[in-house]
Image: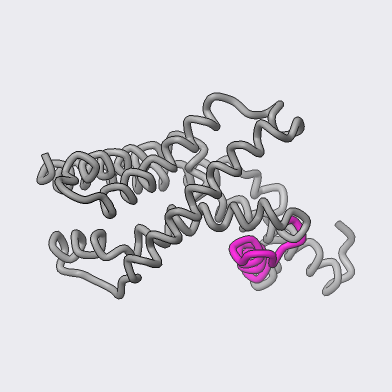
């Protein structure tokens, strides 16, 4: 079972995730009405690129944007959750060793103690975000079963991985559960709201291009938008 889950099933999960995300990004870009502003975008390509990068950067850095600073507690929980979901798996020793065995490629890893701390903080952050959805009426009214399911899918690999790494005795059951829930997460990314892992960059770049070109173009050429 372990060989299957870390072999063919892992390949399949990554393939579905990568190809599915690429398709979502393609559909997003194709659906934009670029022709409405093609003259402006073509005339100011440097402003478009600068605006896109600036928009993405300000939302990737904690408290770099006004929206993050307006809700510091939520922003802290948001970043802790995403660090646990993205940074910890990428630099976890066990994960890097699997990649090294399969592909002969490795990179520096983080200490196990730090990984445990970040995992615990990520789980607590996820629980806080979920409870916040029920505590605040303006968020509760738009919360659906889909949102709860997404949080469960996201937290399951963290919880099972933490237990598998820290329990004594035979941990094969929890290890298999961790691998299975991790692969479920990968497969779910293109088909759920988890696709924001890719669409975030698309939407922030689009907004940054609009602001960069139109505001920059207006200042630089006297054009009124």
Q: Nearer the viewer, residue 123 or 90?
A: 123
Q: Quadrant of residue 98?
A: bottom left
**For residue 4, above or below residue 165:** above
Question: Residue 81: horizontal and vertical position, in percent?
Answer: 51, 52
Q: Residue at position x 87%, y 64% from top?
A: 223
Q: Residue at position x 68%, y 66% from top?
A: 51
Q: Residue at position x 71%, y 48% from top?
A: 36
**For residue 105, above or below residue 30:** below
Q: Residue at position x 64%, y 49% from top?
A: 34
Question: Residue 57: horizontal and vertical position, in percent?
Answer: 61, 67
Q: In this view, does 68 lie to the left or right of 81?
A: right
Question: Which image quadrant: the N terminus?
Answer: top left
Q: Nearer the viewer, residue 145 or 53?
A: 145
Q: Is residue 186 left or right of residue 131?
A: left
- Quick check: is 56 in the magenta stretch? yes
- Quick check: is 65 in the magenta stretch? yes
Tell me the magenta residue range.
Answer: 49-67
Question: Residue 71: horizontal and vertical position, in percent?
Answer: 74, 53
């Amino acid at each position: 079972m372990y060989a299957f889950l870390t072999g063919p099933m892992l390949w399949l999960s990554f393939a579905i995730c990568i190809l599915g995300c690429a398709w979502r990004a393609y559909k997003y870009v194709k659906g934009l009405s670029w022709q409405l502003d093609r003259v402006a975008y073509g005339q100011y390509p440097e402003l478009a690129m600068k605006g896109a990068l600036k928009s993405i950067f300000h939302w990737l850095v904690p408290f770099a944007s006004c929206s993050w600073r307006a809700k510091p507690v939520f922003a802290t929980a948001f970043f802790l959750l995403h660090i646990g979901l993205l940074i910890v798996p990428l630099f976890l020793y066990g994960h890097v060793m699997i990649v090294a065995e399969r592909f002969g490629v490795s990179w520096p890893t983080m200490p196990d103690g730090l990984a445990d701390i970040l995992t615990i903080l990520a789980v607590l952050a996820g629980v806080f975000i979920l409870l916040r959805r029920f505590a605040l009426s303006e968020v509760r009214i738009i919360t659906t079963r889909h949102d709860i399911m997404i949080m469960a899918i996201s937290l399951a690999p963290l919880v099972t991985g933490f237990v598998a790494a820290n329990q004594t005795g035979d941990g094969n059951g929890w290890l298999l559960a961790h691998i299975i829930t991790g692969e479920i997460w990968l497969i779910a990314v293109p088909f759920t709201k988890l696709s924001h892992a890719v669409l975030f960059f698309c939407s922030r770049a689009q907004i940054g291009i609009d602001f960069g070109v139109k505001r920059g173009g207006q200042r630089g050429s006297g054009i009124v938008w």
